[in-house]
Image (cartoon, helix red, strand yellow):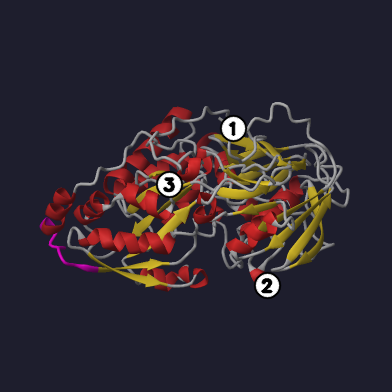
Amino acid sequence: MSVPSIPVSRRRAMGVAAVGGAALALPLLSGCSDTDEAATPRDDAHDRRPQRGGTLTAALAGGGPAESLDPFSAASPADFARNRVVYDVLFWSAHDQVRPGLALSATTARGGTSFTLKLRKGVVWHDGTPFGARDVAFTLRYVTSPERQYPSELTGYIDSIGIETEDEHTLVVPLRRPIGDPAGLLAANQIFVLKNGTTSFEAGKVMGTGPLRVTDFAPGRSSTLRRFDDHWDGAPYLDKLVVLSVNDPQARVNAVRSGQADFAAALPYTEAAKGRGDGATEVRKGTESERTGFGFMLTTGRPPFDDPRVRRAVRLAVDRKALVDTVLLGYGEVGNDLFGAGAQYYADDLEPLPRDLDQARRLLRAAGADGTEVTVRSAEIETGCNASTEMFAEQMKDIGLKVRAQTVSAAEFFDVKAMASVDAVTFAIYGFPLQSIYTRTALRPSLAFGDKEFKRSLADAIAVRGEDERQQAWRRVQTAMHDRGNWVVWGFADTLSLTRDRVRGITGRGTAKYPYLGKAWLA
């Protein structure tokens, strides 16, 4: 099955106005083409053609000493943005389409026992050696190794030990369970390809096939990358990219306004609401398909959220517009209890439940849960998560549900035992493909939705080969989650950045949270 070209789905129009005229988090970690800027609409019709040369300095939140050039150990925006231009992926997904990267096609065998990958020819590593099938086989074994702290969920699908290379640009990957759309699953997992035999990720030793190569790396501080002229998709426009690790949002803003940086990601909504820029800078936002979903995940393995009536009562009691207006300052739209807005197969016509406190109270009383106290674990994994938890607690008082916020640091938040000990967690998930969102949350018992019909539909959505069948299966998955699931997705937030007005070509490639800088240029 070759990589399909799929039309963009409809987007809901909720009518939430932007302020001032105007942004999983599991370690999945949020009318444009892949070459469009992730920016506020602007008229570039009279801009010159992209120019070569210059240095772009980007300020992003970092990961301190834990930052890594291993793309499968990265955990911070600085890590992700840097690694996205050092390495290339097999496939990637953006704007409702799966696109070829180092792989051109993925064809499932009859019976679904394996799939064949056809790779791009003429690709070379940063040291000039040719890329080939052995590199991909090594990478798939690396990411699925049980020795890794966080093995890829692909471990449950592919038998990496049995991978066979047919020739330098073809390999056959055996499967543990059927995959109807292997290109989509690989795109969802963002498989950055490593050179065969890679053992070191030190600057000067690490090898990628991406448009930029690392020449200097100081974890938690800065990294320097230079143009790779032999990139298969053409040499990048920039001579050099500098990535600064700056955790304080205001410091990132100040760096751009003072001219120390050209681009700052994750602009706070409060800062954006002050104005659009100062003449030399401007606020830009990612596309609607790259918004971040904000919400809560309810633990269904025990009372009270094992009862679908209680889960529905919560969704009926949430004041979504108040959360969007107050927490996001209007930069976004209300949510419909489904993560993944903008993704392929996303059911954007399933509307959010209207707020109905009377019905919510009746459901809560019928379930015997009136007056129940629940604990919601929260951390500022995205700006506004803690504020949304506080508002959620106030809103639940209106139906007699007592919510206690358990606020922890972002570093503590994902502790497996701690997450399993509470009744719900605040959550934010970027614009990843549905395969990634649903399979990764299903791996954590405290986040999983154990409904039998839901699980059957999810298995079908991953396994079926026909496009129409897959569309129908994803529809069933989302209908079950929307009707009786454990997600309370109250809003989709815009991703904002502050940029010097000379910067062009920064794209999201599926998630504006981790900007793709490989096609950036300076006017």
What residue did someone put label 3 on?
A: 330
Residue 176 or 255: which is nearer the viewer?
Answer: 255
Q: Is residue 455 left or right of residue 255?
A: left
Which corner quadrant of the image does residue 235 belong to?
Answer: top right
Which corner quadrant holds the C terminus?
top right
| Secondary structure of the residue carrying numbered label 1 | loop
Residue 244 visible, this angle: yes
Q: Amino acid at mark 2?
A: Pro
Q: Residues within 10 Å of mark 3 (few under 14, many from 20)?
A: many
Q: Is residue 158 left or right of residue 457?
A: right
Q: Amino acid at mark 3?
A: Gly
Residue located at (11% from left, 58% from top): 365
What residue did someone put label 2 on?
A: 65
Q: Position of residue 253 (x, y in %)?
A: 63, 57
Which of disc 1 and disc 3 is earlier in sequence?
A: 1
Q: Position of residue 152 (x, y in %)?
A: 57, 57
Numbered badge on residue 32: 1
Residue located at (21% from left, 63% from top): 401
